[in-house]
Image: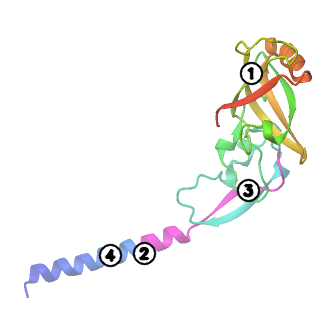
Amino acid sequence: MRPGLLGLAVLLIALGGLGSAFAVTSVRATGSYLAVARAVEVGREIRADDLVTVQMAGGQGLSPVAASQLDEVVGKRAAVALTPGTLLTMAQLTDDPLLGPGQQQISLALTPGEVPARTLSPGDKVLLVTTPDRNSDSRGPGTRFEATVIETATPEATSVVVYLALPSRDVPAVVVLAAQKRIALVLTKAA
């Protein structure tokens, strides 16, 4: 047996042992992270009692917020609905106000069959399209209004309420059309 090959074999075994030791210690390493303690609605300001510190081992591929960043998180707004028991990530938070400049919030009560997706999420882009008046022979293209989903609610099994951010100039027309049941909701881009 050649001494060079024997030395190479010993070196490879030692490197394999070091790699295994590193892998085991990195998986066992624990850290303190922030988790959601109670439900937080979209747009609501985060308070310290909305969060809890948890210990987690491993977590490769995850990007939870470290417990040491609590002061940075408190006061931000929820960009999405936060569910109790889930880890908090910075992508779920925003400094932006719920409505942008020149926007107002409206709600549309729809039946489940009128909602374009099984669930709409905050940030989804939708198009509100007018439908023809039943008493009119007009079949021209409907007027279109762009909006962003803020939140949805299902107060009962037969209705879905969709809360939308809409440019202020479009609000009066959409409110009238919604009262006449002449609005169709179209999902154009999922968040």
Q: Of the residues shown, which amino acid type is indicated by label 2?
A: Ala
The residue that label 3 is drawn on is 35
**First along the sequence among labels 3 and 4:** 4
Q: In which quarter of the image is residue 188?
A: top right
What secondary structure is found at the residue carrying circle 1?
A: strand
Give the CA separation, mark 1 to mark 4.
63 Å
**First along the sequence among labels 2 and 4:** 4
Q: Of the residues shown, which amino acid type is indicated by label 4?
A: Gly
**Residue visible at 80% across and 43% down in the picture:** 46
What secondary structure is found at the residue carrying circle 2?
A: helix
**First along the sequence among labels 1 and 4:** 4
Spot occupied by residue 18 in the image (x, y as percentages of width and height): 36, 74
Task: Report the disc number at residue 21.
Answer: 2
What secondary structure is found at the residue carrying circle 3?
A: strand
Q: Of the residues shown, which amino acid type is indicated by label 3?
A: Ala
Of the two numbered discs 1 and 3 in the rendering, the one whose residue sits closer to the viewer:
1
Q: Quadrant of residue 99?
A: top right
Q: Are marks 2 and 4 in contact (CB under 8 Å)?
A: no
Q: Nearer the viewer, residue 185 or 170?
A: 185
The residue that label 1 is drawn on is 129
Q: Nearer the viewer, residue 92 or 7?
A: 92
Give the CA separation, mark 1 to mark 3.
40 Å
Q: Of the residues shown, which amino acid type is indicated by label 1?
A: Val
Spot occupied by residue 59 in the image (x, y as percentages of width and height): 57, 62
Give the CA separation, mark 2 to mark 4.
9 Å
Q: Residue furthest front?
A: 137
The residue that label 4 is drawn on is 16
Q: How crowded is mark 1: few (under 14 residues within 10 Å), some or many (20 or more)?
A: some
